[in-house]
Amino acid sequence: MSKNHPCPSFPHFIHGADYNPEQWMDPAVWDRDMALMKQAHCNEMTVGIFSWAVLEPREGEFDFSVLDETIRRVRENGGKVILSTPSGARPRWLADKYPEVLRVRPDGAREHFRGRHNHCFTSPVYREKVQKINRLLAERYGQDPTVIAWHISNEYSGECHCPLCVSAFRDFLREKYSNDISRVNKAWWTTFWSHTYDDFDQIEPPGPLTENAVHGLNLDWHRFVTHQTTDFIRNEIAPLRELTPHIPVTINMMYEFYELDYHKVAQVIDFASWDCYPEWHNGDDAVIAQRAAFWHDLYRSLKGKPFLLMESTPSLVNWKPYNKPKRPGLDVLSSMQAIAHGSDSVQYFQWRKSRGSSEKLHGAVVGHDGSGDTRVFRSVQTTGRLLEKLDQIAGTLVEAPAAVLFDWENMWALNDCQGYAAENKKYFDTCYEYHRLLWERGIQCDIVSPRADLSRYKLVFAPMLYLTDKPVIENLTAYVAQGGTLWATYMLGTVNETDLCWLGGIPAEELKDVFGIEAEEIDTLYPAENRKATLDGTVHTLVDYCEVLKLRGAEVLAEYGDDWYAGTPAVTLHRFGKGRAIYQACRDTGSLKDALAEGLLKELGIAAPVLGPLPHGVTAHTRTDGTHSYVFLENYTTEAHRVRLVRPMEDLLHSGTVEEVILEPYGLGVFSCSEEVSHG
Ligand code: GLA
Ligand code: ZN
């Protein structure tokens, strides 16, 4: 399955870590690292991430000796390297000589030299310096088979309000609105409060001291930040594409990340990778696992193929309000969770714990004791052995019968809008809720853009899809017309692409025909309030939102039980073309969706590779190579659980053929069979 593997030159499970030997400059430490790397069953090190000051200590004076030595040592140790470009943090001389590389904050203040991830994305000098060092790295290491991928910069984020960025924003708008300021005024509804612009040069990015009440402006600024960051990434990658077209590139993305539209950014990289740091043990681990699962599913769906888990901690982080180590068993399980969802790696931040600075107490494979005889190290060894045992699964795919639509533009517009529950719209939480319906049943789920090709899914959820532009309306309409089952919620189709409300009633345009309803009002509940809805004689609890519907052809599945809208539709079903459209007008606490999903999944023939309902906190995931199914059972609870597979399967972690499995606390099982088991 090497063709689907993120790093085709090394089509195995990758087990490694961020490795920063330049912080130590001690051959004895480096020797020890290599010995421990073998003991940990690691086969990869990610190097060079924050090493610009070592690589170019003075402008134009390069010194690759430490990186040469690092790569040589890893190679001679039988390992591979993911090589980073160093742009995530710049050397002091660069900031001193070219202050334009420093970021300007929304209030107009330019930052001093400090921290990381805070450079200007527009600065021509920064772009040139980054290209120069990237070119040298590609020339020097690009033909070395030790290098299996490029890790571009680190965790791109943030925005810059410097004069160069402001001017680039104006150019972005000029292009978008055909250099016609009246189009901007119309698109952003600027007559409101007399905010009409006469010229593009009057437009400033939103900030605490500048215009921030024009929603269309705010939305276009978000789009510009994605556009400019992506352009910066493209600039970084250009010399690598030229000199090393055979080495794939990635960027490391993040959990619940708000600022960049990763659907757009992903277009310039070859595979997705991400840094996964859930807050384990802060409440129910089943809930935490399912939320992490959402992001694993999202990163797999981003490129429709395996991704890499670029960073995770083998024990604890140091940047949360409370920093708790993972309990015994959970590290291995959470590492294997990534594999179950389609990752071809387990990688850690970091290999060796820094001695000083802000991350000195962050978990690492090797601690300050320098020892391999620790609970954490042994856990990493266990994961390494498991990955070796399961190597045949590397490069295999996940085929999901269902998807949840997730959209950054929708999230920006929704969170920006003044209305509903002003500060508590819960877009992430709501998307997690629909994903949960599948996670709890052991059914694969993709997380895709509303602009994606949906034809391969039997069931699609569209939670809180407030912003729907014409292409999205057409995509959803075509999906249902051609036989899909679409389940949308309150707020669907409220605004268009520039954040203007759709006229003629919502949901917008053809969506009214697709769903056979029209939403007339929405009741936002106070946090202490509940409402009720009845589905098939069972009463379910509602919170936060109850939309009041007019029927335009749909049948009623559930009705409101109280308040002035008692007896009116709460959930509807409408047949449209060859498909069906379900509209859930209210937010429920879980049981209403569960009841609806149960029947619907059966009707659609979507089933898990297990028999009977899974216990709370236990889930199943399936990868496939076209001839074999690989089934992962994961137990995120501290009790043992019994699970029955749909048919006898080979036990890949032990031996023999099994049908009934006992999962230990935080336990894992991996099974294979030569048939399709993921969905009917
Ligand atoms: C991020 C960064 C790393 C490190 C870790 C700590 O993921 O990429 O450099 O700071 O967080 O958790
Ligand atoms: Zn800037």
Image (tube, rainbow, N blue to C red):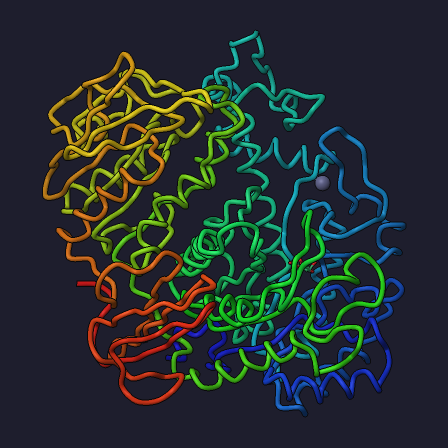
Q: Which residue appears at 23% of the width and 56% of the height?
A: 456
Residue at figure coordinates x 56%, y 56% from the top left: 280
Tell me: 16 left or right of 450: right
356 lies above or below 215: below
Query: In this image, 143 relative to 20: left or right?
Result: left
Q: Quadrant of ligand 1?
A: bottom right
Residue 492 visible to an observer of this rendering: no
| Left or right: 466 as drawn, with respect to 167 | left
Instruction: Confirm whether residue 498 shows in the render.
Output: yes
Q: Residue at x 49, y 33 (%)?
A: 176
**Residue 231, image x, y percentages:** 58, 50
Specify the quadrant that holds the N terminus.
bottom left
Q: Depth check: give the residue in front, 199 or 26.
A: 26
Quadrant containing the C terminus in the rendered view: bottom left
At 56% from the left edge and 12% from the top edge, which residue is drawn? 196
Q: How many labels does the image show?
A: 0
Residue placed most toward the observer, 114 or 170: 114
Seen as rendered, the residue at the extreme top is: 194
Q: In which quarter of the image is residue 390?
A: bottom left
**Between 539 and 100, which is closer to the camera in this rendering?**
539
Q: Position of residue 238 (x, y in %)?
A: 60, 62
The vertical placement of 512 against 137, above or below, is above
Residue 677 in the image: state x and y as whole percent.
Answer: 22, 70
